[in-house]
Amino acid sequence: MGHWLQRNIIEPGKLPLLLALTAFVLTFLITRVVTRMIRAGKGPFGNVSAGGTHIHHVVPGVVLTVLGGFGAVASGRYGFGSAAFAVVFGIGAGLVLDEFALILHLADVYWTEAGRQSVEVVVVTAALVGLVLAGFTPFGVNDVSQDELQDRGGVISTVAVNFLFALLVLTKGKARMAIFSVIVPLVGLIGVVRLARPGSPWARRLYRRRPRARARAILRAYRHDRRWAAPRRRFQDLIGGKPDPVHPPAVRR
């Protein structure tokens, strides 16, 4: 294990990335535990307020992200400074993305259905950083040979083709697949050959006069959502907690 860590993490200068990812994941998990305890009224924790204003943890998260980011850039890839600033950045990023839904909606939606977006963004971010840590590079540059790396035209063409794959997958309404295809181009190739989701720009433009393709896309999307929606919601509830139930407005009589 020590030899693997030295050869694959420390020597290539990936130790700060590993520390940032570890701090990011641990911060998110600890934050969710604390917020769930506050929600349940258990433990010594409570909401932080200043002058009657509730201070969300995204605020210190932004401060730590800025400090850690600039510090990491200034300190380089090696040494104690880079490792320390990587941890600071990971903690800040964990606090910020835990309230991603709040930033997106500009409202306190932490325990609502919309708050699930924060959990999804954190999981996707951790997975992408994990892939980069494992040796993948954006747009498949890691698959380019040493001879091709010396040829700028070959590298540019590889990046351009894989970027086109990701863009096509995005127009097909498959945002998660498009994001992962940036790191793993094969994912983008699979997304390109598969049917687009109904309502996507691709489907609206190219399936408009193809009723059979449109019907197949609707049926496939329905089956996919029915199969994966419930497990994904249970996974999000396990990590982030269940959203508050939505009660219909009372009807006046």
Image (cartoon, rainbow, N blue to C red):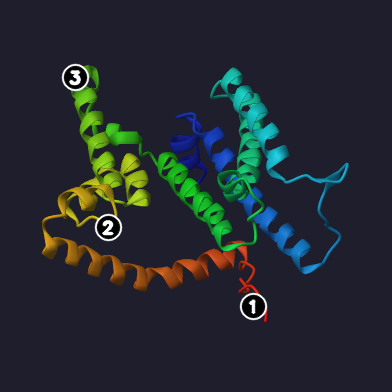
- Residue type indicated by callout 2: Arg
Report x, y in % for residue 141. Answer: 29, 31
- The alpha-carbon separation of the residues under discs 2 and 3 comes to 34 Å
The part of the image, by quadrant, that contains residue 153 is top left
The tag on residue 197 is 2
* Residue 151 appears in the picture as rendered: no
Along the viewing direction, whichever of 9 and 153 lies nearer the viewer? 153
- The alpha-carbon separation of the residues under discs 1 and 3 comes to 67 Å
Reading the image, the residue beneath label 1 is 251
The residue positioned 22% from the left and 48% from the top of the image is 202
The residue positioned 84% from the left and 46% from the top of the image is 49
- Badge 1 or badge 3: first in the primary sequence: 3
Label 3 environment density (alpha carbons within 10 Å; few <14, some 14–19, many ≥20): few
Reading the image, the residue beneath label 3 is 153
Label 1 environment density (alpha carbons within 10 Å; few <14, some 14–19, many ≥20): few
- Viewer-nearest of discs 1 and 3: 1
The residue positioned 72% from the left and 45% from the top of the image is 57
Report x, y in % for residue 27. Answer: 66, 48
Answer yes or no: do the residues labelled 2 and 1 have beta carbons within 8 Å?
Answer: no
Q: Is 141 situated left or right of 70 in this image?
A: left
Answer yes or no: do the residues labelled 1 and 3 have beta carbons within 8 Å?
Answer: no
Count of numbered labels shown in the rendering: 3
- Residue type indicated by callout 1: Val
Instruction: Name above or below for residue 162 compared with residue 35.
Output: above
- Residue type indicated by callout 3: Gly
Along the viewing direction, whichever of 238 and 249 lies nearer the viewer? 249
Report x, y in % for residue 124. Answer: 46, 50
- Badge 2 or badge 3: first in the primary sequence: 3
The part of the image, by quadrant, that contains residue 78 is top right
Instruction: Name above or below for residue 179 compared with residue 157.
Output: below
- Badge 2 or badge 1: first in the primary sequence: 2
